[in-house]
Amino acid sequence: MSMQRKAPPTWDKVGKHALFPEAKHDEIARFNFLANLNMHLSSDVIPGVKEAYDGRARPQFFAQHGRDPETRHEVRALMSEDPYYQWWSALRRSTMEMRQQAGRSLVLRQMDKLNKVAASFNEGQDTLQLNDDLPLPNYVTIVDTHCMPGSYHTAEVDGDVSAGANYDSGIFVTTVGQLGSMTDGGGRAISDWLKRDHGDFKPQRILDIGCTIGHNIVPLAQAFPDAEVIAVDVSAPVLRYGHARAKALGVNNITFIQANGESLSDLANESFDLITTSMFLHELSTQSMPKILSEIARLLKPGGLSVHLEQPQYAGRPVFEQFMRDWDTWNNNEPFWGTMHDVDLEAMIGNTGLPESHQFTVAVAAKVDESIFPKTEHDSDSEDFGRAAAWNVFGAWKPTQSTKQESAA
Amino acid sequence: MSVDHITDAGKKAKGDRPYFLASEQTEQLMNITMALAQELAVTRERMDTLERLLESASIFSREDIESYVPDSEAAEQRQLWHQEYIARILRIMQQSREAIKEKQDGQPSTEDVMKDISS
Ligand SMILES: C[S@@+](CC[C@H](N)C(=O)[O-])C[C@H]1O[C@@H](n2cnc3c(N)ncnc32)[C@H](O)[C@@H]1O
């Protein structure tokens, strides 16, 4: 029997809202090409890198050294000479750059209109609080994060939202739709997990740090409609877009604030029940990360919960897998990715006053979005055919007075 | 302030661009080829739409396409389309130029960025 191939959802299935850039026929086709190219690279090309490693690079290393490579750095030095790895890397880098160009050409041609629509949602709203004088941390500006020209923080003109619009429209392509039509799979996974495993936890005040355009805080604001939600980021263009996007989606309980998570002195001690970060810690620096974790510990109410959604840490993983996971550190302008994934997170969070006894790690997966991945007769409920994205949640409860005494006793 | 959306869309991301293939020029050529592959796919999808619509509506025949002559407005639109098309295909050259300037302006190497950020 001939194999049935999976087709990723076409880009026109992306979830739209009033602020979402309008795409023409060829722009959609360009994104469709890129989604299929991404899928091809991960299903047909990447496996060959492991085959090249096992089949020729590792044996050659063994012959020379009498042992296998022991660190991901040794694997990288070895593989950087391998022609197959070189081709895959060259293609991957090229695909990232094409995705940026496709998103930017879509957005920049309609920038004036998008900025006007955003302004119509944002003007006079006290739920958007920008601060032009906020200095941008050097780890935000030193390179353009994952090859996004201008990164999150560059405004093309005053009042610009194009960085947010580019991010919103292209991420569906990079993730091949796996995060759902609204690219909110991470936030939905957190709220589903909370409702399932901690049904009686009803946060009144929620904080999200490094919210970008609010992809993953919007589903939490929707899951807890009575909660007061604060979402902070240092970058104004994505905040303008995120605030307008939330309004356009009818979500009114989020206040977007331009602030640095290292120092949130305007927010009172012990004033939040739930503090989240999504795919955020890896874009920081060795200096800033402990500061932000300490702010979280300060801001949490006793009994409150902090959760970080991230890819799993490297420790204990095979060196080849570490090397592959580390590709972005070296080649996709994610300079802190590798350092962060080596950090002893438990100890670092423990040092902020959220003891290891109150920490946990759970694996969560985004539910397959059936509006874009229609169920076929071949699907069973338990199988997702690799369409669902998976992350780790690193969580910590802040001890209450009584548990503090208990652990002191 | 005005933004030239064609050039700006192809802007280089700040930071060293790694090259992987033995020769930088070969890899640049690969990038050009991949962009061409993309645009060919785009054209193919558009043709497919067209053919399907024509087929279902039987509005005009393929013969009409063969004998079509653009008026002056259509001709200008087509020429501008060519400009954007070429800028897209030659993005890697634009970014190589920007890389030279970026170094002159003192952008640190990836290694120095990592040292700086992780110290
Ligand atoms: C990878 S994105 C986060 C994605 C987002 N949380 C989501 O779930 O879609 C990282 C964001 O962190 C912001 N950022 C970086 N350093 C920050 C800091 N010190 N304080 C606040 N935001 C920061 C950047 O501007 C960027 O928008």
Image: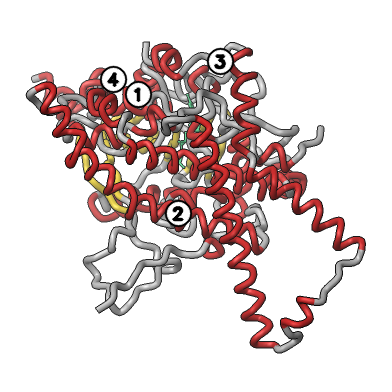
For this view, does A144 lie left or right of residue B68?
Answer: left
Q: In this view, does A205 lie to the left or right of A302?
A: right
Name the residue beneath numbered marker 4.
Answer: A352
**Quadrant of the image occupied by residue A72:** top left
Q: Which chain carries label 2?
A: A
Give how far apart the Cα atoms at labels 4 and 1 are.
7 Å
Kindly identify which residue carries mark 3.
Answer: B107
Residue A293's mark? 1
Disc 1 crowd, CA 10 A, few/some/many (<14, 14-19, 20+): many
> Which residue in the protein does label 2 denote?
A37
Going from N to C along the chain, the mark reached first, 1 or 2, is 2
Find out whether the residues at labels 4 and 1 contact each other: C-beta distance under 8 Å: yes
Chain ID, mark 4: A
Please determine if labels 4 and 2 lie on a single subunit.
yes
Ligand 1 under 8 Å from disc 2 Cβ: no
Query: Residue flagged by tag 3: what amino acid is it?
Result: Gln
